[in-house]
Amino acid sequence: MDKQTIDSIQNLRYQAASLLVYQSVLSEGVGLAFLKLLEAIVNRDVDDIRCLKTYGDWFQGLASQNQSWQDYLFRQILRADNSFTRQVQSSELETLPPALVEAARHDLQALQNIYKCSTKQLCKWVKRASVLPVELVPWNFESSQSRSGSDQIDKRTQWHADLQAKLNNLDNWADGLEAIAAYYQEFGTGLFADYQGFRWQSGQLLGIANPDPIRLSELVGYELARTQLLKNTEFLLKGYRALNVLLYGSRGSGKSSLVKALLNEYGEQGLRIIEVPKSEMIDLPVITEQLRDQP
């Protein structure tokens, strides 16, 4: 393998190693497979089979999620849970420690360089590193940007696509930090960026991928309780002090449906709901501690 190619691969490894707050983007799954693949390619004593195997792991990771490498990486940036994203979701950039902001800018520039590494380029590098006559298939998947305008999509998906398009037009992603911070402030980070509904189970918070789609317009009765609950929820979402609420009534009277409908009504405005089974109510202090720093 020629020196220019090795230098290009090593530069990507240096960029990844230099991350200060966004390490989680490449710490598991497809991101970690990418780093292992770079290591296998650049190793001068490369094991051909190991190199092909690591490429297969990376390929399979993307295929299982039906995402391009660029879409995967960008999604990981937007859902990253770190010291910067946690603080900026409830504070303005200028109020954060300057070193933390500079670290985020540095990481975005480094991740931009990694983002530019195409599947086609990786295929070429693997072929050069391996002497085995194996034809590699590059992973090609249509970017979410080209698909976003064709279907009716939710607010978060549209914001994601618009933000990705904006950063693709920047020479330096560090210049887009304010726009990324606005995304965190609107949609949260980590699990709270991925899901609106949650279930507490065996000591951990689990996201609900497909919550009950029931809408408030489908419910009848409980008019007074519904009006009061909606008003209280709207106060909460506006940042005002809201009251604790206890819904009571006979079984099947619609209490659970009313709460689930709130999520479909206000989820895009930032509402998140956690279902805690009666048997695990003892964990409420643990749950509230985990949520303490969430906006």
Image (spheres, helix red, strand yellow):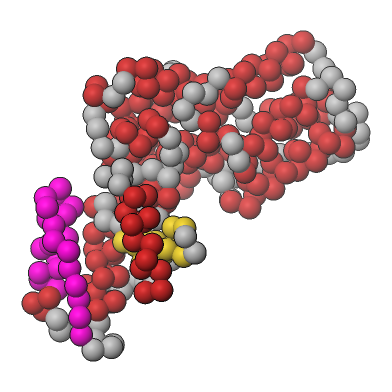
Q: How many marks?
A: 0
* Residue drawn where x is 63% and y is 30% of the image: 118
Q: Answer left or right for 251 relative to 61.
A: left
Q: Answer left or right for 76 relative to 139.
A: left
Q: Quadrant of the N terminus?
A: top right
Instruction: Say which quarter of the image contains residue 220.
Output: bottom left
Residue 74 in percent (x, y) is at: 48, 36
Q: Nearer the viewer, residue 231 or 49?
A: 231
Residue 23 in percent (x, y) is at: 53, 31
Q: Which residues are magenta?
A: 226-249
Q: Nearer the viewer, residue 250 or 158?
A: 250
Residue 195 in percent (x, y) is at: 40, 55
Q: Answer left or right for 200 relative to 259.
A: right
* Residue drawn where x is 24% and y is 22% of the image: 94
Which residue is most to the right?
132
* Residue drawn where x is 58% and y is 51% of the image: 65
Res 120 visible: no
Residue 159 in percent (x, y) is at: 34, 43
Q: Answer left or right for 150 relative to 237.
A: right
Q: Is residue 244 magenta?
A: yes
* Residue drawn where x is 77% and y is 10% of the image: 3
Res 291 visible: yes
Q: Quadrant of the C terminus?
A: top left
Q: Is residue 45 magenta?
A: no
Q: Is residue 31 above or below residue 270?
A: above
Instruction: Say which quarter of the image contains residue 278.
Output: bottom left
Which residue is most to the top?
3
Q: Is residue 2 above or below residue 275?
A: above
Q: Is residue 11 above or below residue 38?
A: above
Q: Is residue 137 above or below residue 236?
A: above
